[in-house]
């Protein structure tokens, strides 16, 4: 499957943490009753009500969109991952390990009035080994008198204990300043910002690419923009459509017919790949008058593998009769199932039929490509979905999805944190439901799983 990465043992270290390129992730860890959920409530403030924990009942939500001094981050509350009755050091350590795997930085909460317990020591060992930034929170320091209690926590080997009262708010601002300092800045979006949106017009030879380009360009034929600094010297064309200027990338290749006529599939593939590299959205032309070919399917796969937005244009519609159109529908159902989310337009580059429908389809695909679902919204929906249809058992065990987050856009990328392996079919099910709920028309969706077994 193109969209669901195979999970691997130790995958937690792959990539640069779950917040990249989306929001950075801050996880709150610590043994039961040190005040984690009180602290989470404090950080979220009154903007988001956290359901108060019932002893022995696991919280059903663990990830929240949080904000401090204008910076957005994802706050993960690990409190619900353990039944409170099971206070074993090993389990707390395991919880900390999961948190470290997914977070960019950790708030390690300790009860200053109790001092460091065996469980705290176990967590500290995990955190020291992981090498992730840690802010050691000495909680329940409600007043100046209890500050002395916190000093013993230096023994955990995690630096200075930051004295906080989650209950009264004392010290929590300084603590957040330190935590945010430890979080990585979100990297800038990788695509160039501003300027016209970049469209690749692709398809196998003779489907009508240059005819369509001519049709779209119309009188604007003269508007050619050469991109400097590349050895191949690709030529883009700026074309105004529907009141917006679009950059059709690598149009020289479309006109350089002789290469394709030399019979080298290789050049066609190379050109398609280079156009895709530079484009945000691909319009794949397919000849509606002929049966779908292997090459058409290969080109569609190239688009999804490149992670670009996709519009499918059935060209030469003027050459189709009713019989062909009926057959086409069946062909699409059967062979284009994997890209059924792509908007489709039936056009004729020769007559101009429905060519004006291309722009709305392109805009729709780009919207889906850039769509972002908040962590809160995503998890509320996912929890309901999983409650209604739990993942199948693996080796007699029920895999748990701890939470999910959208790690990026262009294309949308979701990461599911699980305590067990989710079957391929179940991940496909989640993707299908995700599309039903949130749309994502015109874009591949990436779903990866981070596994703790
Ligand atoms: P969790 O199990 O780590 O999520 O802990 P909770 O947030 O449920 O807190 C456990 C208990 O400690 C509750 O009774 C809280 O009211 C109390 N608590 C939390 N933070 C503070 C604090 O800063 N000062 C005091 N005195 N009590 C606190
Ligand atoms: P390219 O190789 O994809 O750039 O395809 P061309 O634009 O050169 O078109 C190949 C052939 O198909 C030419 O003879 C075009 O006139 C013809 N063609 C392109 N679009 C249409 C269409 O919509 N209808 C019909 N009937 N012919 C078309």
Image (cartoon, rainbow, N blue to C red):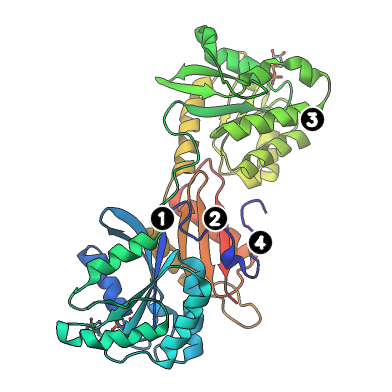
Q: Residue furthest right?
A: 263
Query: What x and y, as percent, mark residue 393?
Result: 61, 77
In front: 37, or 155?
155
Q: Nearer the viewer, mark 2 or mark 4?
A: 4
Query: Which residue is the site of mark 1?
Result: 23
Ligand 1 appears in which quadrant? bottom left
Q: Could one spot residue 355 in this view of the protein? A: yes
Q: Which mark is residue 291?
A: none
Give the secondary structure at mark 1. loop
Label 3 Cα crowd, 10 Å radius (few <14 / some 14-19 / many 20+)? few
Screen quadrant of the N terminus: bottom right
CA separation in Å, label 3 and label 1: 40 Å
Q: Nearer the viewer, mark 2 or mark 1?
A: 1
Identify whether 428 is placed above or below 40. Answer: above
Give the secondary structure at mark 3. helix
Query: Which residue is the site of mark 4?
Result: 6
Identify whether 107 is placed above or below 431. Answer: below
Query: Which residue is the site of mark 3?
Result: 266
Q: Are marks 2 and 4 in contact (CB under 8 Å)?
A: no
Label 4 Cα crowd, 10 Å radius (few <14 / some 14-19 / many 20+)? few
CA separation in Å, label 3 and label 2: 34 Å
Query: Which residue is the site of mark 2?
Result: 432
């Amino acid at each position: 499957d193109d969209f669901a990465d195979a999970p691997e043992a130790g995958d937690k270290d792959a990539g640069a943490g779950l917040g990249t390129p989306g929001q950075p992730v801050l996880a709150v860890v610590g043994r039961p009753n040190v005040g984690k959920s009180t602290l989470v409530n404090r950080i979220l403030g009154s903007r988001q009500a956290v359901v108060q924990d019932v002893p022995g009942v696991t919280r059903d939500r663990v990830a929240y969109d949080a904000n401090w001094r204008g910076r957005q981050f994802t706050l993960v509350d690990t409190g619900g991952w353990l039944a409170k009755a099971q206070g074993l050091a090993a389990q707390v350590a395991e919880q900390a390990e999961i948190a470290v795997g997914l977070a960019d930085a950790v708030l390690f909460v300790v009860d200053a009035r109790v001092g460091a317990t065996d469980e705290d020591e176990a967590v500290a060992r995990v955190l020291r080994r992981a090498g992730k930034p840690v802010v050691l929170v000495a909680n329940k320091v409600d007043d100046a008198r209890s500050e002395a209690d916190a000093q013993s926590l230096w023994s955990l080997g995690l630096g200075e204990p930051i004295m906080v009262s989650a209950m009264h708010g004392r010290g929590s601002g300084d603590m957040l300043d330190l935590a945010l300092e430890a979080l990585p800045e979100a990297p800038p979006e990788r695509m160039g910002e501003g300027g016209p949106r970049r469209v690749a017009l692709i398809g196998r030879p003779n489907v009508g690419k240059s005819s369509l380009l001519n049709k779209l360009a119309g009188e604007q034929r003269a508007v050619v923009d050469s991109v400097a600094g590349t050895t191949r010297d690709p030529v883009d064309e700026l074309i105004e459509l529907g009141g917006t200027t679009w950059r059709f990338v690598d149009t020289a290749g479309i006109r350089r017919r002789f290469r394709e006529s030399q019979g080298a599939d290789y050049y066609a593939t190379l050109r398609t790949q280079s156009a895709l590299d530079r484009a945000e959205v691909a319009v794949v032309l397919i000849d509606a008058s002929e049966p779908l070919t292997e090459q058409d399917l290969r080109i569609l796969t190239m688009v999804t593998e490149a992670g670009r937005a996709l519009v499918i244009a059935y060209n030469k519609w003027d050459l189709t009769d009713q019989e062909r159109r009926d057959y086409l529908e069946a062909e699409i159902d059967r062979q284009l199932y994997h890209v059924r989310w792509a908007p489709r337009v039936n056009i004729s580059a020769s007559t101009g039929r429905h060519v004006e429908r291309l722009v709305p389809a392109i805009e729709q695909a780009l919207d889906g490509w850039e769509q972002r679902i908040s962590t809160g919204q995503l998890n509320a929906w996912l929890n309901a979905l999983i409650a209604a249809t739990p993942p199948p058992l693996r080796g007699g065990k029920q895999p748990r999805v701890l939470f999910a987050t959208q790690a990026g856009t262009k294309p949308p990328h979701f990461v599911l944190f699980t305590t067990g392996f989710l079957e391929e079919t179940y991940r496909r099910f989640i993707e299908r439901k995700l599309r039903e709920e949130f749309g994502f028309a015109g874009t591949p969706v990436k779903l990866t799983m981070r596994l703790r077994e």
